């Protein structure tokens, strides 16, 4: 949020709140109290807390410190201090703060729902100071670096709507710091900042009165920012009803960029400063324009500005340079177009090769399937021939066995029938012949038999004559 740094860094991170209820002992060194922190939506301080942002704040509550700057001479707390490291930590929000949305009747007679939580106070360390916290106003501090948001009109009123942010601490405020928000109240009044400025001015006066008249202090950026804001917004005080005429956007060495609330127009506020007196005055104001351009448009504007600040020769040289760059770009474009054509040709060739390969693959698949079909047909034929051959051989073997059925018992032939596939026809014939010889050896024994021998007689004619030629021997 670069808009209004004085509001952003010094005010947007401070919110008034209050500790309420009785303080009860938590343990020997801690006491528990409850704090009423904030409510949602718009408030008279010009800020707006949405439901989503409220959830983000609540999620960052655990372990947030309860801080304070206690003035022993005054016997009271002061304010936020100039630095966040001032003062002490008098307590902390516990991990489980017993958070709840609770209604409260504010001084203006309205009932509002506040974010409430438990706090643990170090009464064992700072007994008196910690016990006073329950009677004091408090202000929640948001971590400045985490804040994000924007100005918007809601229900006809202009608010700064938070989108991002988290707690930095819960600051105890003294009785002289008047809260500007009903009930828990957002922010302290701007006069708390005024008090800081006044103390700085008093401190500087004391230095001057003490003999340091020759000491000069260079104004810091924050001091310049605040002085310009004060000069442009003379009615931003309680008497002027806190009217804001200008927001400060940025501060540069010679001028500040501002936004006029009434004119709704950006302006430059030129200023001069005197380092000897640490003073600043606005010398003039003029309208300015913040142009929304992209990178190429910005480049074109830079070229025009540069051309406007140069002679014709320089402009002509710049033009020629741009023309040369344009020619180089055209050459690159032509080269790219040639490469694109080459790539397109290569792609077309690859597409044809792919189609050819797909066709060849399809033909190969078909041939493969045809081969499988042929192999299947041949296998069926081979199986049929094998079965026929086996049947023929079996029949021949059966005939061999049957040939011995008259000479051998069936009990002898049965084992050969059962194992008929074990033998060839020739082997089966040999085996059965061997078995037959073993079972009937007499078949191959030599026996004496009668034979007829012709007699050497005269010639005999007729059948009787022929038979009579043989004698019984």
Image (tube, rainbow, N blue to C red):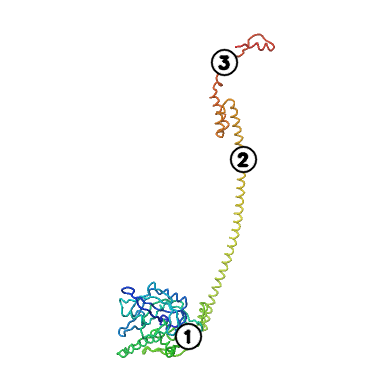
131, 253: nearer the viewer = 131
Residue 427 in sight in this render: no
Say whether disc 1 or disc 3 marks the residue closer to the N-terminus.
1
Instruction: Where is residue 97? Give x, y as percent.
Output: 39, 73
Instruction: Where is residue 378? Give x, y as percent.
Output: 61, 43
Instruction: Where is residue 180? Give x, y as percent.
Output: 41, 85
In the displayed structure, does residue 274 sit left or right of residue 297? left
Residue 373 in sight in this render: yes
> Which numbered circle lies on residue 448?
3
Quickly name the residue at label 2: 384
Q: CA distance from mark 3 to mark 2?
A: 57 Å
> Which numbered circle lies on residue 351?
none
Residue 230, picture quadrant: bottom left
Quick check: marks 1 and 2 in contact, CB under 8 Å?
A: no
79, 214: nearer the viewer = 79
Quickly name the residue at label 1: 259
294, 90: nearer the viewer = 90
In the current view of this chain or complex, which residue is farthest to the right?
462
* Residue for point 59% across, 34% down: 394
Label 2: element kind: helix
Instruction: Where is residue 182? Give x, y as percent.
Output: 43, 83
Label 3: element kind: loop
Local crowd size for mark 1, using a 10 Å CA cut-off: few (<14), some (14–19), many (≥20): many
* Residue for point 38% across, 84% down: 220
């Amino acid at each position: 949020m670069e808009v209004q740094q004085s509001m952003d860094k010094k005010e947007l991170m401070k919110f008034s709140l209050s500790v309420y209820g009785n303080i009860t002992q938590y343990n020997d060194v801690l006491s528990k109290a409850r704090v009423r922190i904030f409510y949602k939506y718009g408030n008279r301080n010009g800020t707006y807390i949405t439901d989503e942002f409220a959830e983000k704040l609540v999620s960052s509550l655990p372990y947030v410190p309860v801080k304070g700057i206690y003035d022993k001479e005054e016997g009271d707390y002061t304010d936020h201090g100039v630095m966040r490291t001032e003062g002490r930590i008098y307590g902390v929000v516990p991990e489980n703060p017993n958070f709840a949305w609770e209604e409260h009747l504010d001084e203006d007679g309205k009932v509002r729902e506040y974010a409430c939580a438990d706090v643990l106070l170090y009464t064992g360390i700072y007994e008196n100071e910690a016990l006073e916290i329950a009677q004091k106003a408090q202000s929640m501090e948001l971590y400045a670096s985490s804040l994000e948001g924007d100005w918007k009109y809601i229900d006809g009123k202009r608010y700064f709507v938070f989108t991002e942010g988290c707690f930095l601490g819960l600051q105890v405020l003294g009785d002289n710091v008047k809260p500007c928000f009903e009930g828990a109240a957002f922010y302290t009044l701007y006069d708390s900042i005024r008090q800081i400025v006044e103390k700085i001015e008093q401190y500087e006066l004391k230095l001057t009165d003490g003999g340091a008249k020759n000491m000069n202090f260079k104004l810091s950026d924050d001091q310049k920012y605040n002085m310009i804001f004060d000069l442009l917004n003379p009615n931003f005080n309680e008497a002027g009803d806190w009217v804001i005429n200008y927001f400060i956007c940025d501060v540069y060495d010679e001028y500040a960029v501002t936004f006029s609330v009434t004119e709704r127009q950006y302006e430059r506020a030129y200023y001069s400063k005197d380092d000897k007196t640490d003073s600043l005055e606005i010398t003039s104001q003029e309208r300015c324009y913040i142009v929304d351009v992209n990178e190429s448009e910005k480049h074109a504007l830079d070229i025009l500005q540069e051309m406007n600040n140069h002679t014709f020769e320089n402009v002509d040289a710049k033009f020629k340079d741009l023309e040369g760059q344009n020619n180089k770009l055209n050459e690159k474009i032509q080269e790219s177009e040639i490469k694109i054509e080459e790539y397109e040709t290569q792609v077309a060739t690859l597409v044809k090769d792919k189609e050819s390969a797909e066709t060849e693959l399809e033909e190969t698949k078909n041939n493969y399937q045809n081969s499988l079909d042929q192999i299947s047909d041949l296998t069926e034929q081979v199986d049929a021939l094998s079965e026929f051959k086996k049947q023929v051989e079996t029949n021949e073997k059966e005939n061999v066995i049957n040939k011995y059925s008259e000479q051998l018992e069936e009990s002898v032939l049965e084992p050969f029938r059962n194992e008929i596939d074990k033998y060839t026809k020739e082997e089966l014939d040999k085996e059965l012949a061997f078995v037959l010889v073993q079972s009937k050896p007499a078949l191959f024994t030599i026996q004496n038999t009668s034979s007829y021998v012709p007699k050497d007689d005269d010639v005999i004619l007729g059948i009787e004559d022929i038979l009579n030629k043989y004698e019984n021997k």
